Image: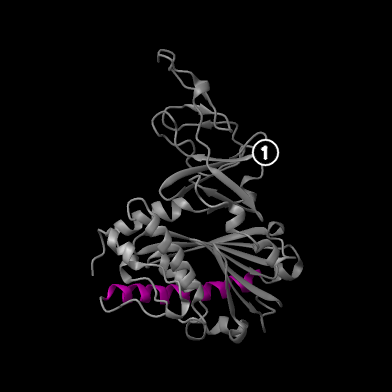
Amino acid sequence: MRTDNLRTDDVRNEGLNQDLTRAHALSARYYFGEDMLAMEQRAVFARSWQLVAHQGQLAESGDHVVEQIAGTPVLLVRGQDMVLRAFPNVCRHRAGPLALCNGKGARALHCKYHGWTYTLDGQLRSAPEMQSACDFRVEDIHLPPLRVHEWQGLVFVALRDDVPAFEDVYAGIGERIAPIDLSNMRYQRRDSYEVECNWKVYVDNFLEGYHLPHVHPGLSKVLDYRAYDTELFPWHSLQSSPLRDSEGIYGDGQAFYYHVYPNVMLNVMPGRLQSNRVLPLGPGRCRIEFDYYYSQDARAQARIAMDAAFSDEVQHEDVAICEAVQKGLASGFYEAGRLCPKRESGVWHFHNLLRAAYAGDGAGA
């Protein structure tokens, strides 16, 4: 199986699966190769809203967070005017970093390479020993702003101006989960898992409940598989199910499992949010970051320990099956299989968004 040098014809021939009842999954070749990952960084991750922080990390003036999006170093900082801004974490002099790690209360941004200093709104303030540079003026130099959006206590950044409007991508989610208000929940912890599979294998797995009875015996007991439903929207999908017999873990109510293209999941339970980011570490390896938030009522607080143990059990089950699927894709014996219209519409939706991104890539269309 060829894993590199993805050709233009490969993308064009993949086509859009417009009819769910006739749909096939993505071909195996899309889950391998440095060329494929480089194209996705450019066509998928750099052209989408990426979850990078929560508001508690950026509560006060000078608070800042360092991240990467599609290989681009990114810096978020709360200004003295309390406006949240995002910039490439790249000095305009010779590309040195303006911050090396998350921090609190900075009064300015100091390049760690040559000491150029910027205000918190990105304006160059001083450049040591540059007096002899002809026509050099600090007031002419400003860090290029990136798009940033705060929503329900979460912070997102987009690298490009042509990324769809945030309000369109997340349209209707806040209204659907009401009266739950995610911004009222408090960050509790992060769990991370490194998985030997392509990032899309993990997303594919998240997007269907078809595997629940076969992979997740414990989770199947608290979700009603018969009532498990998937709904599709332009940029996200929702899987939902009534909760049952889960008082000690989730409580009573509804489970909402949102996937927002391309790599963000929001798992909303009564009194609890689990946000997931799926981050490629290479063509066949990814890291899944789970951030947990809880409301401050006594019942939600009492469930934290049980939720942690139960979630870890579910994630290890997912890791095992995803790593097995990656090996199956690499076997040379897999051809793109038919999708189950009743259970895998979310996979079909995700794959069609990817197909459109691949076809629209400047180097691949």
Answer few, some or many: residues within 10 Å of disc 1's Cα (few below 14, many 20 plus, some between 14 and 19).
Answer: some
Horizontal side of residue 318 vs 245, given as left or right: left
The percent coordinates of residue 173 (x first, y second) are: 65, 63
Residue at 44% x, 36% y: name it. Answer: 90
Q: How is the image coloured?
A: one colour
Task: Please identify the quadrant where the N terminus is shown.
Answer: bottom left
Q: Judging from the image, what secondary structure is the residue with disc 1 in? A: loop
The percent coordinates of residue 107 (x first, y second) are: 60, 31
Magenta: predominant secondary structure element?
helix
Task: Please identify the quadrant where the C terminus is shown.
Answer: bottom left
Q: Is residue 225 one of those drawn in magenta?
A: no
Horizontal side of residue 60 vs 194, given as left or right: right
Horizontal side of residue 322 vs 76, given as left or right: left
Q: Nearer the viewer, residue 282 or 165?
A: 165
Q: Amino acid at mark 1?
A: Met
Q: Which residue is mark 1?
A: 82
Disc tally is 1
Residue 121 in view: yes
The percent coordinates of residue 155 (x first, y second) are: 59, 51
The percent coordinates of residue 28 (x first, y second) are: 32, 71
Q: Is residue 196 above or below residue 281?
A: below
- For the magenta stretch, what is the residue range? 304-331
Q: Nearer the viewer, residue 235 or 57?
A: 235
Residue at 23% x, 66% y: name it. Answer: 2
Horizontal side of residue 101 vs 41, given as left or right: right
Q: Residue furthest front?
A: 18
Q: Is residue 324 one of those drawn in magenta?
A: yes
Q: Is residue 247 above or below residue 109?
A: below
Residue 207 in view: no
**Rendered image quadrant of residue 29:** bottom left
Q: Nearer the viewer, residue 183 or 25?
A: 25
